[in-house]
Image (cartoon, helix red, strand yellow):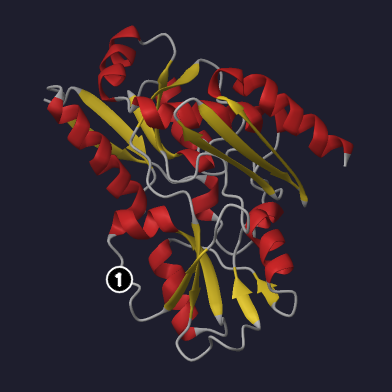
Amino acid sequence: MSDMVIASRGSMLSLAQVDIVDTQLKKVGVNSERLIISTKGDINTSKALKDIGGNGLFVREIEAALSDHRADIAVHSAKDLPYELADGMTIGAVMRAASPADLLVIKPGHENHLQIIGTGSARRSSAIKKLYPDASVKNIRGNVETRLRKLSEEDYDAIVIASAGVDRLGIDLSGYTVKRFSPDEMIPACAQGIVAVECRSDDAKTRSILEKINDCETQKRFVVERYLFELMKADCSLAVGVHAVISGEELTVYGLFEGRTASRTGRYSNYKALCKEIAEEIYRQ
């Protein structure tokens, strides 16, 4: 009999992320089984995210499984989390972060004439329009494998995908030209590259288990980025990015909201004040 039921989406990346959590749970003596949930974002794959509403597109149906006790925990790409979790929910753990960077994957032979670049993200689209003003941005949706197939078969010259997804799936991009964007070029989505484990706030037993598998260093970055994201009260239908770089006690935070950017550097212990300054500066622009 399983000790814990894990709810997640059914994509290969989602299942790979469940594997990461399951491995950590086994280390503390907890077995699990899986409950696969189709979310609004999974069902509607033809429209851009901004056109179907961005608040919790990949999360709310999974949270419902927690709420009605069909599942004990939920595993999410942390960048998919809305700025407010459902009532009675909390993030009990985060796994060690992968790279937060975005990648431009270019079709062979198209390196010198990027005319059509695919992305379904308002944030990525905003950055691409600045970095490649002569290119057109065309909507593309689907999991990593689907988007790579569309790159090969359709009229895209390049697509933008997250480095973390490529790394966790072990996808070989050696047949493509790949550019890794710096945070200055393309500010990542909030908590991009982080796997978050959600549970019911009142489930003390589960929370105590999750504390044992939580990655403390990743949590520091997660807390800062989520705090600024919550201040901006934005969702994935908008061009919003948040990125924190932590080195010892030094912290640098970058924020993006609909083309407006700001950053601050200071001590980690002062992250709330730094984030508030960023939010205020962005809203003044």
Q: Which of 96 and 246 is in front in this view?
A: 246
Residue at image location 26% in from the left, 25% down from the top? 213
Asked which quadrant contains residue 120, the reply is bottom right
Q: Residue furthest bottom?
A: 109
Residue 12 visible in this rendered orientation of the protein = no
Q: In this view, does 38 lie above or below 129?
A: above
Which x, y percent locates residue 7? Answer: 35, 35
Which x, y percent locates residue 211? Answer: 31, 17
Q: Nearer the viewer, residue 161 or 185?
A: 185
Q: In this view, does 81 lie above or below 204?
A: below
Residue at image location 80% in from the left, 38% down from the top? 282
Residue wearing tag 1: 172
Which x, y percent locates residue 143? Answer: 43, 61
Q: In this view, does 21 lie to the left or right of 281?
A: left
Asked which quadrant contains residue 139, the reply is bottom right
Quarter the C terminus occupies: top right
